[in-house]
Image (cartoon, rainbow, N blue to C red):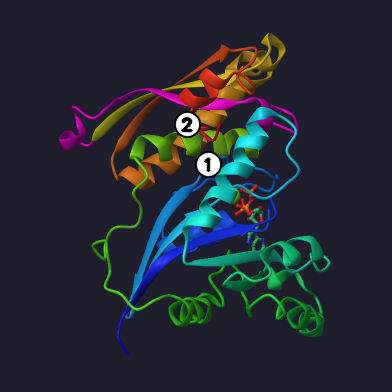
Amino acid sequence: MPPHAGNVALVGRPNAGKSTLLNQLVGARIAAVSSKPQTTRTRVMGIVTVPGLQAVLVDTPGLHGPRSELNRRMVKAAEGAMDEVDLLCWIVDATRPFDEELAARFAGRKVVVALNKVDLLDDKRLLLPLMAMYAQTGVVVPICATEGEGTSALLEEWAKALPEGEPLYPEDQITDVREKDICAEMVREQLFALCGQEIPYVTAVEIEQFDESEREAGRVTIHARILVEKPSQKAIVIGAGGKMIKKIGTGARKRIETLLGVHVDLRLFVAVEPDWTSNPRLLRELGYTGE
Ligand SMILES: Nc1nc2c(ncn2[C@@H]2O[C@H](COP(=O)(O)OP(=O)(O)OP(=O)(O)O)[C@@H](O)[C@H]2O)c(=O)[nH]1
Ligand SMILES: [Mg+2]
């Protein structure tokens, strides 16, 4: 069979497991994952190369009803990605009822449906009626993104749906996201994991310094600034006696060290920027484009 290659957008509702699937397929943690919805804010690119297929993946923010300017840009980033790809892979949470609204929205598009989180279904017979409903939209493949189950069947369906073509990227390249941007995502992931319900949504992370001058010697120094909207939020992120910020730093440092393969000296600073979720200039500087 001639090789197939093309662009695939991972789309769906917030929290369906899009970023988990991206990380699983590229074999590294390049996208932030959390149990809270709206973790992903921008497009994250990953590359999967297996015999006969190279899929260039775009992980997108979940499709949701936008409230703030930041939310609006997130949805726009997802919609923009949808328009530019050869194939949509709709990631569905199998524990949720059939999603009529998105099914209608994707009608007429080339779609493969990944029915995710099947490990959470006590009774696997529940899968059949769901698969039948999603089959109206595209070929359905049940998967468990956290364990990687069903992913080879998914890649086979992608290969069938993508045009014939030679790989565009070297087979060992897994992303074109800058290391610096992945590091910011890893700090943001810790904010989602550790900071309660409100804080993740009012914080952003900016890498102020990424010093690789000692990389050969096995050391990289990173300074990251965590933006919040109010002084009270700054106090929460820092925590009593600096405990919270320390935890965030330790968690993020471990992930970044795994990614870079060197010792990382990570310093975190917290700054109040009252209107960062609505200020176009700040949003642009933070990489949230889509005016
Ligand atoms: N049990 C189980 N949990 C999963 C599976 N896939 C993802 N999850 C969990 O679902 C939650 C959301 O995963 P994400 O990958 O962040 O979801 P997302 O679709 O990228 O979400 P947004 O970026 O907010 O749109 C996390 O807690 C994951 O660990 C799965 O196959 N089984
Ligand atoms: Mg995500």
Decide which of 1, 16 is in the foreground and name it.
1
Q: Is residue 214 magenta?
A: yes
At mark 2, the secondary structure is loop
Amino acid on which disc 1 is placed: Thr
Q: Which residue is mark 1?
A: 42
Relative to 186, 193 lies left or right: right
Number of the label disc, if any, that sits on residue 287: 2
Q: Which residues are magenta?
A: 195-218
Quarter holding the N terminus is bottom left
Relative to 180, 148 lies left or right: right
In the rendered image, the vertical position of residue 155 relative to residue 191, given as above or below = below
Residue located at (44% from left, 43% from top) = 255
Residue furthest to the front: 108
Residue 50 can be seen, yes or no = yes
In the rendered image, the vertical position of residue 263 relative to residue 11, given as above or below = above
Decide which of 230, 263 is in the foreground and name it.
230
Q: Quadrant of residue 41?
A: top right
